[in-house]
Image (spheres, rainbow, N blue to C red):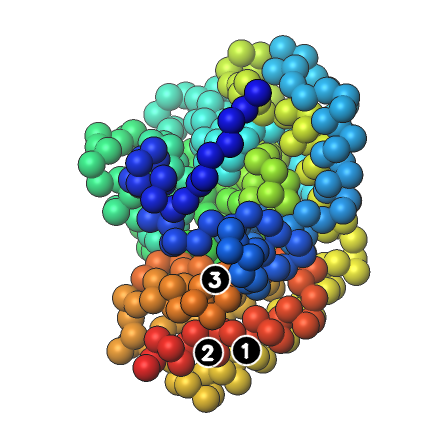
Amino acid sequence: MSSHFPVSRSLFDEVMCPNYAPPEIIPVRGLGSRVWDQQGREYIDFAGGIAVTALGHCHPNLVQALTEQSQKLWHVANVMTNEPALRLAKKLCDLTFADRVFFANSGAEANEAAFKLARRYAWEHYGPDKHEIIAFNNSFHGRTLFTVSVGGQQKYREGFEPVPAGIQHAEYNNLASLEKIISDKTCAVVMEPVIGEGGVIPASAEFVEGVRALCDKHNALLIFDEIQTGVGRTGSLYAYMQTQVTPDILTSAKALGGGFPVAAMLTTSAVAASLKVGTHGSTYGGNPLACAVAEAAIDLISQESVLNGVKARAEKLVAGLNAINARTGAFSDVRSSGLLLGCALKDELKGRAKDFTTAGLAEGLMILVAGPDVVRLAPSLVIADEDIAEGLARFERAVKRVLA
């Protein structure tokens, strides 16, 4: 029998690695877009567990899917397939450009699979010289050694070198910068349709189309990292659907499981053919529990009413944030790609984004940063209007607290 003992924030410093610095509060319960801590204090969740809890906390459809599957089958590993994984894969293929799916447990793992597949595909079709990957400055693709090397932020590579070779970085939204370094040695260009962690910056239509054209010219695969933008976040099921461009490989995680760890790499039959038996794998990838929950999430989020609701809620939030900014003057810009929102701090507040998250908690609001200069919001896609209104009121108080 398990013995229970008091759990406090100080225990974190005793037993956890010091790579995180969580605040004093410990959430214990969530429902919809509200969360309660150990003391019973209530918070409005504009953070969504970093764009993960896309249907809020404890959504009944997800709870039901998890409960039912938990009484049937938990795990078979990749030596066998299972029904939830096959159903989810079929739905993802039906809803997107993809013909084939590989399941993993996290965004980093989905990206790792995508980068390995891109190299393997080029190796099979063009030989070992075609192995270079190009990504963009300020991008974020995960924390494994490979994904952190592809990601365009030096701070995450520091102290972990030497990193894998054959990776270059261009300027986001600057086609000339990509044109300068792309060559017939390039096997793939990887990009976020909206730079998330690096500041909530959308790609221009001209840029996305130009990247696709350059990839085609040099026989390079185009990989869309849709870990943060995917599964309804921008108001389409995937953000590529709002462009004139289709990627060759797309990665999805975060909102895919609505809070249950699951990830997917989607691609075409032609590209997938390079992942022959034994070339890649994941013990937990395609886990029946994860796939059952993800299927329930996709069933809901792919509905037109939910996707249209994202756009309506985003308009409400942007209007509210602009009104707050008119009163406080804290931001140089309010950016929105659906319900992925970024409030860029004005020059004299730059570097202080973390102060806003701290002030937010003091006012009963959970928000995020996107680098040191941008406050990021990624609320539930089905957040109630009254939670938006109350969250904005708390946000305004938090902004004023920082300014004071």
Give the residue at mark 1: 393
What's under tag 1, amino acid-wise?
Ala
Residue 101 position by quadrant:
top right
Q: CA distance from mark 3 to mark 2?
A: 13 Å
Task: Tell me which numbered mark, 3 or 2, is placed earlier along the sequence.
Answer: 3
Left/right of residue 96 with respect to residue 180 in the rendered view:
right
Q: Tally the numbered discs.
A: 3
Residue 191 image offset from top left, x and y in percent = 46, 48
Q: CA distance from mark 2 to mark 1?
A: 7 Å
Residue 230 image offset from top left, x and y in percent = 60, 49
Comparing 132 with 159, the one in front is 159
Give the residue at mark 2: 397
Left/right of residue 136 with respect to residue 83 in the rendered view:
left
Q: Which residue: 45% across, 27% down?
A: 116
Q: Which residue: 60% across, 74% down?
A: 390
10 Å crowding of disc 1: few (<14), some (14-19), many (20+): some
Comparing 246 with 367, the one in front is 367
Q: Are marks 3 and 2 in contact (CB under 8 Å)?
A: no
Q: Is residue 46 above or below residue 125?
A: below
Comparing 177 with 15, the one in front is 15
Task: Tell me which numbered mark, 3 or 1, is placed earlier along the sequence.
Answer: 3
What's under tag 3, amino acid-wise?
Ile
Find numbered disc 2 in the image and state the secondary structure of the residue it sits on: helix
